[in-house]
Image (cartoon, rainbow, N blue to C red):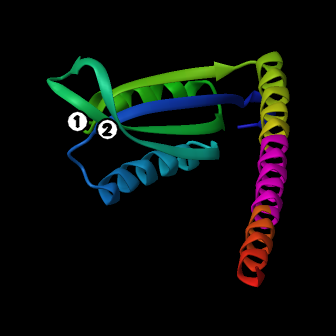
Amino acid sequence: MSKKAHKYYETTFIVDSIYEDERVDTILNKYTNFFKKNDGEVVKTEKWGRRKFAYPIKNKATGSYVTIEFTADPSVIAKLERAYHLDDDILRFLNVSFDKKTLEEREVYLVKKEQIMKEREAAAALLQQQQSAEADTVAEATTTDNTSLVNN
């Protein structure tokens, strides 16, 4: 398959929460290998952890969420959905396709979010320095007051 035919996708699926993290990792590896076998490329994987559902799914109240971002030929999606339906470990899934405009907007959003986080960290560090300096000033003033009381 040519690279030009590949599109950018994101798939999120929910695994039963009774499984240990090792089992969730095994399921994640199973699907990343699925993409590699079908000429896809995994861009990013992310485990969100266990979350409580808003309503029961297959009589379960919680599940482990996993997200995989990948590029692949559009025909892979039908195979992926078939694999999800046949896999008893998967409670629910959602596949999303990103167009070029959405990817650009997403990239701008992520850069802006990272910049805001850096600014917040810098502000927190500055505030911590100021509080530390104020605490030192108060400690010096207390020491000076105690010294003058001892001298009197």
Q: Residue 135: within the magenta?
A: yes
Crowd tier of the residue under label 1, counting other residues whose Cα lies within 10 Å: few below 14, some 14–19, many 20 or above? few
Task: Give the structural element (helix, strand or loop) at label 2.
Answer: strand
Image vertical order of residue 54 relative to residue 120, above or below: above
Comes first in the chain, label 1 or label 2: 2
79 to the left or right of 142: left
Magenta segment's dominant SS is: helix
> Which residue is disc 2 drawn over?
15
Question: Which residue appears at 18% of the width and 23% of the height?
Answer: 58
Pinpoint residue 125: horizontal percent, then vertical percent: 80, 54
Q: Camera-side residue: 9 or 145?
A: 145
Residue 113 placement: quadrant: top right
Residue 138 placement: quadrant: bottom right
12 to the left or right of 92: right
Where does the magenta region start and end?
Answer: 118-137
Pinpoint residue 76: horizontal percent, then vertical percent: 54, 30
What amino acid does circle 2 point to? Answer: Val
Q: Camera-side residue: 1 or 4?
A: 4
Pinpoint residue 88: horizontal percent, then vertical percent: 22, 36
Image vertical order of residue 137 relative to residue 126, above or below: below
